[in-house]
Amino acid sequence: MRWQDVPFFLSYGVFLATSVLSTSFYYRYFMGYPYTWIQSACVALLLIYEFRKGLQGQNWLGLGICGIMALISLQVSTGNLIRLVPLLFMYTYCARNLHFERVARFSMNLSIVLTCFVVASGYLGIIDNVVVAKGSRVREYLGFRYALYAPGLLLNITALWIYLNRKKPSILGTVILAAVNAWVYYKTDSRISFALAILLLVAAQIMRFAPKWVEKLQGLWALAAASFGICGSVSMVMTGIYNGSIPWMRKLNSMLESRLSLGKRSLESKGVSLFARQISWVGNGLDAFGNSTNKAYTYVDCLYVKVMQRYGILFIAALLGVATWAMYRLWKQKHYHILLISATVAVHCILDDLSFSLHYNTFWIAMGLALLNPAALAVPQTEEET
């Protein structure tokens, strides 16, 4: 690692570690002011990293876009965990001059260590390992504060491994990752993350053994490039027009585990604004001490609906526009593996909001690089660059 990049990776490493640990029962040891000071130190390191570049090292258009998005999201950042959103835009901008392979490898290795650490801590009794049974559905939290957290981290790890081994994803590595995903699915019953992880692993092998088809499927890649716009528009419209008295809508809502009805109820009760507002929802996740809430469940899983309500119509329109622009650039630059993974994220965002955090989706940085510095997505040419 070049010494000039130490402030970034130190900041990013601490940010990633505390972000992951904040989703576990270790959060009780640094929640509140300690976490605020940690986040402030991470921002300070980023500023040091940027100031060393000087004015000539800035991408002013990118700085403007990321800065505005960060400031808008910061307006409604009422807690430590919600501040992860403005920090996402900051890290995406500050990583513009780094090869994505470096960021991806760093993220994957640290995420593996952190995930294994939390799961092992849960099984060793160092922290709680909650088991929740609802009817025939039994979910083990694996040391985390909700059943979806470990599968979400593993899905990102799987995607990063696929990207880093895109030229020749080994059969052994694929089998091991499939087995680990299957085990986590068995423990947590997290169907969506498991299904998408297996889909990505299968697709990676198809792209390895049938590379000629990759170039020929331009229609599919065009659809992938438009995935954020399509998924965002469809999910918001379907939530807005949902009517439980219509049989096919009621059946679709049942298949989606009441996501449409909950989203519609949120739209009716909390409304929508052009600008950001402080809105909160009540979910099934536990607090840092393992306590659940007695309030009625109101959580909105759809990222697009949630972002629209909390950050405003202008923000979600800008986010989808920038994301579609980035996906289009990835398509034209023929970064098909990143395009596939990001399109999968776009679909995942219909059903889950976790992907709006860097520890669950490192590929926000790749999408940013497609706009800010496409050369950073090229394969590093020397040992020094990696």
Image (cartoon, rainbow, N blue to C red):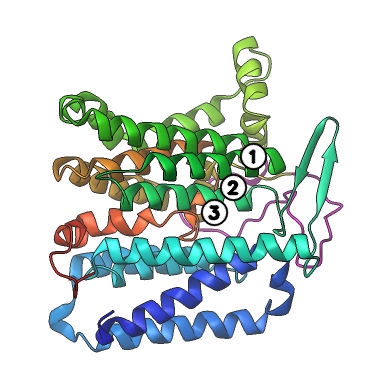
Q: Is residue 94 above or below residue 246?
A: below
- Mark 1 and mark 2 residues within 8 Å of each other at the beta carbon: yes
Instruction: Between residue 252 and residue 21, name the one nearer to us.
Output: 21
Q: Residue at x 42, y 74 (%)?
A: 12
Q: Judging from the image, what secondary structure is the residue with disc 2 in?
A: helix
On the image, which quarter does residue 234 sit in? top left
Please tell me whether the stretch drawn in magenta is mainly helix, strand or loop.
Answer: loop
Q: Nearer the viewer, residue 264 or 355?
A: 355
Q: Which quarter of the rendering shows the C terminus? A: bottom left
- Three-letter residue code for mark 1: Tyr
The numbered dot on residue 151 is 2
The Cα–Cα distance between marks 2 and 3, rounded to whole angstroms, is 5 Å
Q: Which of the numbered marks, if any, corresponds to residue 153?
A: 3
Element under disc 1: helix
What percent of the width, then of the height, locates residue 184?
64, 44
Q: Is residue 294 magenta?
A: yes
Residue highlighted by disc 1: 185
What residue is at 61 percent from the left and 79 percent from the top?
Answer: 35
- Position of 271 compared to 385: left or right? right
**Contact (Cβ within 8 Å) of mark 2 with mark 3:** yes
| Along the line of sight, the residue nearer the viewer: 304 or 24 | 24
- Which residues, given as a range, are shown in magenta? 268-297
Residue 220 position in % (x across, y down): 26, 26
